[in-house]
Image: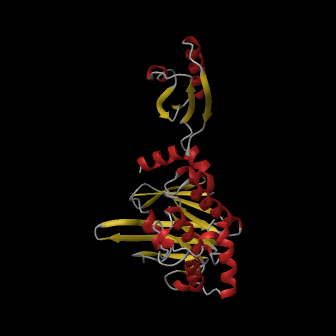
Amino acid sequence: MDAIRAEHLKKAFATVTAVNDVSIAVKEGEIFGFLGPNGAGKTTTIRLVTGVLTPDTGTVHINGIDIHRHPLDAKMQMGVIPESSTVYGDMTAEQNLHMSGKMYGMPRALRDERIDEILLRMGLSEKRHTLVRTFSKGMKQRVNIACAIIHRPRVLFLDEPTSGLDVQSRRLVIETIQDMNEQGSTIFLTTHNIEEANTLCQTVCIINKGKIVAQDSPERLKKMFDTTQSVEVSFDRPVGRDLLSGEGILRAEPCGDKWRLYTDNPDQVLKYLIGRAERESIGITSLATSGPSLEEAFIQITECT
């Protein structure tokens, strides 16, 4: 059974159709990545699927439950982490968790047990009695996530969960997503971080201009554009662009202290770079090839639709 099934969703705001005949099926137990450029319809879709908005047409089922006919039953199956924090600043971290647990019908003893466990996991045990309004953005997001998972939801929706977070908070969020999935939760992840989707997701779905334009595993999406590969190279001193416009190089982009060279013939580029560097007495400090990236596939798919 699909954990999430949305069929033929459509939602218009005045003259703008934000979501246009969108159908999504998410298998039970998978991490499903939902990508798209700004204004593509991602947030509207997630609001439709979680029951925040009612579609003009279409249906949504969560673990087989129609969310618009039986909204309470469907919402008890899921946890939702929106893009903007929904925690209460004038309550402590522990009070926020207790309130969330009560809303899901959890008895006090079970709430106490889960709160201790989650606060420890999220690195907030020492801040449990501190008002959330004094927290940093990363700490507020940790409380936000803790509130969404206190009842161990079978389906977890996350809308840009790591946006703007510090490295430590981002790592905690990623680890929590992986832990929840290992415990059996289906994850629906909306993100702008292409590498995050590539690392976490079994399936990636791309929306553009309100329509689904691609859906497959990250590797198969990348192979749609396997003519574009890259060579990353760094030298022991600065080099001019003339050295990076030789045989087989389609384009060159700076990448930190390295250059990324796009090509359809990496073997030719490697031989050119080694020969040119030797002739001009330039040291190569690192040299690596890679296949097409999910980011490259994303850009080409959205530019073509």
Q: Position of residue 251 (x, y in %)?
A: 46, 30
Residue 80 sits above or below residue 110 on the image: above
Count of number-bearing discs: 0
Question: Is residue 286 visible to the viewer in this orientation of the structure?
Answer: yes
Residue 302 percent location from the top left of the image: 44, 50
Residue 82, placed above or below residue 294: below
* Residue projecting furthest to the top: 279
Q: Which residue occupies 52% across, 53% down?
A: 193
Residue located at (48% from left, 57% from top): 164
Outermost residue, left direction?
15
**Relative to 6, residue 297 above or below:** above
Q: Residue at x 48, y 20 (%)?
A: 243
Q: Could one spot residue 267 in this view of the protein? A: no
- Where residue 275 sits, quadrant-wise, is top right
Q: Position of residue 128 (x, y in %)?
A: 60, 74
Say how the picture is coloured. Answer: secondary structure
In-front residue for pair 294/128: 128
Q: Which residue is at 51% across, 21% downward?
A: 247
Comparing 138 with 42, the one in front is 138
270 is higher (above) or lower (below) than 135: above
Q: Where residue 52 sits in the image (x, y, percent)?
A: 45, 77
Q: Quadrant of the N terminus?
A: bottom right
